[in-house]
Image: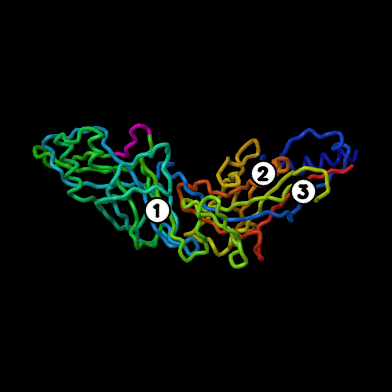
């Protein structure tokens, strides 16, 4: 009767647990005939470090990032967008007279850092066409294309929460040249166009310290205004829309940071790991640039063996306090993160899941109104596998915001060596003894 009571207690106590934390199993005869006990353990050792991925795909979600600001911990953050444009057809009235040309950039509603500061964007022509290199299928945060001429510039205060756009008047001669060549038949197809016009780069002023703003690249366009002498008073226009010819992405964001005079080392490659020290007992996450926190568990099998208890992992969460002075209204934290499994070279293998859905970590607060946040990340499926897979001793987990390739969101995490609020692995262990 005692065994039945324990089983009912466990079932009722944990029926409200989220799906990723529940393991269904068929109990053995030894299990049913045993005394069951739950143990909560927070002393199992693990390693935390900071790594930087070599490159991140940034030609996704239809948007580009543009801006520049100085982060007190991560250095100078710079984002520039590259976009290709072309018309749907190459037909302008023979009598048309060019008037002006503008670039229209709709907001994507993404922003990071201080949007109350004035921004200045520069528009430059590209020296080469946006195209993949041999064997390449995406553009990355490290991709760059040289430019030729500055063809536009505008200073403004962002209005990112509105269904609005920024219109920048472009150089008259730039517009006149393209317009007349299309009207006169010198440009009659995409191949002709790309001999003269390769696309544009949109970047921030070199002295800017303001914000990163997202723009909707696929809905942006270059508009040529013109008139016809026999039709006075009637404004006409001709558009270059985003060039999606062939279904291949023709936009991307270059994102980099100047980390001079910061705590960060020179990340040589994926395998470089920056470990917490007494002076800097933290780990770091920075979307866009590709800096992420890694967890590894090289002694986990031995730790479980040292318990000297037959049982199984019921639940395992990382509770990771955020450095309380590292976030603000401008430098805000993400609401949630995803977890990737990485190999011994820190190459991503897959997302972490529990067999049902992706494991997701959430940023939480114990008490409303108190500026103390922590990240709670479920990792039971990884640790369960690690018990029976020797290779996992060399594998790890990295914490990555969901929009890591289209944002510059960042976090500073208290490490497991922090003397104040340290990161802990909280393991709920279900053990059974005859």
Specify whether residue 26 is in view: yes
Q: Secondary structure at mark 1?
A: strand
In the displayed structure, would residue 115 be above or below residue 134? Answer: below
Q: Residue at x 50, y 54 (%)?
A: 268
Figure quadrant of the N terminus = top right
Q: Earlier in the sequence, mark 3 or mark 1?
A: 1
Q: Judge left or right: residue 99 versus residue 84.
A: left
Circle 2 residue? 392
Tag in front: 2 or 3: 2
Q: Secondary structure at mark 3?
A: helix
The magenta span reads 241-247
Q: Position of residue 325 (x, y in %)?
A: 55, 65
Circle 3 residue? 304
Q: Position of residue 353 (x, y in %)?
A: 62, 40
Instruction: Determine which of the numbered discs, if any, sits on residue 79 in the image.
Output: 1
In depth, the one of 391 and 402 nearer the eye is 391
Q: How many residues crowd around disc 2 within 10 Å: few (fewer than 14), some, or many (20 or more)?
A: many
Q: Earlier in the sequence, mark 2 or mark 3?
A: 3
In the displayed structure, would residue 216 be above or below residue 420? Answer: above
Q: Judge left or right: residue 90 versus residue 94.
A: right
In depth, the one of 352 and 55 nearer the eye is 55
Q: Position of residue 275 (x, y in %)?
A: 60, 59
Q: Earlier in the sequence, mark 2 or mark 1?
A: 1
Q: Judge left or right: residue 306 versus residue 405.
A: right
Q: Are marks 3 and 1 in contact (CB under 8 Å)?
A: no
Tag in front: 2 or 1: 2
Q: Residue at x 87, y 36 (%)?
A: 30
Choose top left, top right, bottom left or bottom right for residue 220.
top left
Whether residue 235 is in magenta: the answer is no
Q: Secondary structure at mark 2?
A: helix
Q: Residue furthest left?
A: 230
């Amino acid at each position: 009767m005692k065994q039945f009571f324990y089983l009912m207690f466990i079932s009722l106590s944990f029926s409200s647990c989220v799906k990723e934390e529940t393991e269904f199993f068929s109990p053995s005869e030894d299990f049913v005939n045993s005394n069951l006990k739950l143990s909560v353990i927070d002393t199992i050792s693990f390693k935390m470090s900071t790594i930087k991925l070599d490159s991140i795909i940034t030609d996704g979600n239809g948007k580009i990032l543009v801006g520049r600001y100085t982060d007190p911990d991560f250095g100078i953050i710079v984002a520039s967008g590259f976009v290709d444009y072309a018309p749907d057809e190459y037909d302008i009235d023979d009598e048309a007279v060019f008037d002006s040309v503008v670039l229209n950039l709709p907001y994507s509603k993404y922003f990071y850092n201080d949007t109350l500061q004035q921004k200045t964007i520069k528009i430059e022509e590209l020296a080469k066409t946006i195209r993949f290199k041999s064997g390449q299928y995406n553009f990355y945060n490290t991709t760059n294309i040289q430019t030729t001429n500055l063809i536009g510039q505008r200073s403004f205060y962002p209005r990112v929460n509105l269904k609005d756009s920024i219109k920048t008047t472009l150089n008259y001669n730039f517009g006149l040249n393209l317009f007349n060549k299309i009207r006169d038949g010198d440009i009659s197809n995409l191949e002709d166009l790309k001999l003269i016009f390769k696309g544009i780069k949109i970047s921030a002023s070199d002295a800017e310290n303001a914000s990163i703003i997202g723009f909707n690249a696929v809905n942006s366009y270059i508009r040529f205004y013109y008139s016809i002498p026999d039709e006075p008073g009637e404004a006409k226009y001709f558009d270059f829309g985003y060039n999606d010819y062939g279904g291949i992405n023709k936009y991307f964001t270059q994102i980099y940071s100047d980390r001079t005079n910061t705590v960060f080392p020179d990340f040589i490659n994926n395998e470089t790991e920056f470990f917490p020290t007494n002076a800097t007992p933290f780990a770091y996450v920075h979307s866009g640039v590709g800096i992420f926190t890694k967890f590894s568990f090289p002694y986990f099998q031995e730790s479980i063996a040292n318990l000297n208890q037959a049982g199984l992992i019921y639940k395992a969460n990382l509770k990771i306090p955020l450095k309380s002075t590292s976030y603000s209204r401008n430098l805000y934290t993400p609401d949630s993160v995803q977890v990737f499994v990485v190999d011994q070279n820190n190459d991503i293998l897959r997302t972490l899941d529990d067999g049902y859905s992706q494991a997701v970590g959430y940023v939480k607060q114990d008490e409303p109104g108190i500026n103390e946040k922590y990240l709670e990340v479920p990792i039971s499926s990884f640790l369960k596998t690690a018990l029976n897979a020797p290779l996992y001793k060399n594998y790890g987990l990295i914490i990555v915001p969901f929009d890591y390739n289209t944002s510059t969101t960042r976090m500073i995490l208290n490490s497991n060596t922090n003397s104040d609020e340290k990161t802990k692995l909280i393991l709920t262990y279900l053990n059974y003894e005859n």
